[in-house]
Amino acid sequence: MDMTTLRCLVSLADLGSLTAAAEARHLTQPAVSIRLRKLEGELGAELFYRSGRGIRFTASGEAALATARRVLREAEELARELSDLEGLARGRIAIGTIDAASSYVLPPVFSRFRERYPGIEIHLEVTATAPLVRMLRAGSLELAVGTLPVERAADLEIHPVYRERLVLIAPPAHRLARSRRLAPRDLDGEAFISFHDGATTRRIIEEGLARHGAAPRVTITTDSPEAIRNLVAAGLGLAILPERLVRDDVRRGAVRSPRVAGLAIERSIGLVIPARGYLSAAIRAFLAVLAAELGVALPRRLTGSVIRSAPPPRR
């Protein structure tokens, strides 16, 4: 039983297939299968079995999975504590973020953090909010920046840090693109490109339209805002995206952004942090930089007692 095998078990549970688990761990599928079968032999119990196209865990497997998650989380915390003993000259932080935040919310924060703490490596995961929360709970991330609301739970701490307006975009040749006076009901039944079903931003958009009696006809889904923007520019449908994200495309004429009277849709982006467990000095330093750069107030315990370190010695 080793850390890599435990990570394979957790990835299998989170991703639902041996192939996906192997890709996540940068191993071959046979290598993952061998590791997990060996683990079953060591524990003397079957941990999972195939059910249709998916994987189902046995009761023994669920118990092993819970222990694996705890061991990995504690191992990550130990690594952070040992790193803190060296101060902030060296280290690593693991952060997850949604695509939009990585594009225009966090870059100034990353830049200032690198300027102050050049020896700290930033490991960045960019995906949708729900997987980020799962990785946070598994201990592979120390904090996440995602779309709110995130379901409140005793193990999570949530702090809004950014608010933005969402706007309609349309292909330049679309019949609604040049309209001077659009009403929300004009969007009812129109072909839309949107995020996958279950995505927080999609829910915010559809709830905002539903308040005005409009329902989009979603024809293409993706978790990439950039892909949505490009598909709209190619003439494949309408979309509602963050204004900041499409500003340059509107200016260049790649898409149009007709105003919709009375339609005001906004979303909040927030920090999601484990409510329990060790918060490393490097993460507290990052949160202090984030609070200063974005002009937000965070609890003192998240940003306090951070000592600025000198750059690491040259090798």
Image (cartoon, rainbow, N blue to C red):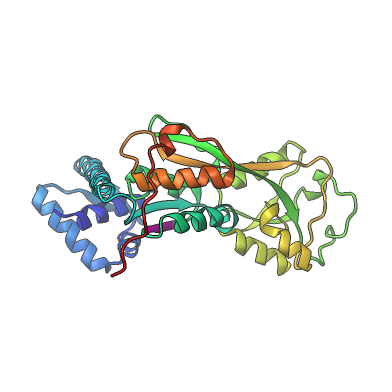
x and y, in percent, of residue 10 in the image: 28, 50
Quarter containing the C terminus: bottom left
**Residue at image point 71% right, 39% down:** 210
Q: Is residue 134 visible?
A: no
x and y, in percent, of residue 285 in the image: 42, 46
Q: Quadrant of residue 3?
A: bottom left
x and y, in percent, of residue 30 in the image: 23, 67
| Magenta stretch: includes residue 122 | yes
**Residue at image point 39% right, 46% down:** 283
Secondary structure of the magenta portion, mostly? strand
Report the span colored magenta: 120-124
**Residue at image point 42% right, 39% down:** 273
Position above or below: 157 against 57: above
Q: How many marks?
A: 0
Which residue occupies the foreground of this view, 220 or 223? 223
| Magenta stretch: includes residue 232 | no
Q: Residue furthest top?
A: 154
Q: Is 142 placed left or right of 48 in the picture?
A: right
Q: Is 154 placed left or right of 162 in the picture?
A: left
Q: Quadrant of residue 275?
A: top left
Q: Is 132 placed left or right of 293 in the picture?
A: left
Q: Is residue 287 visible?
A: yes
x and y, in percent, of residue 197 in the image: 56, 49
Q: Quadrant of residue 306?
A: top left
Which residue occupies the foreground of this view, 14 or 266? 266
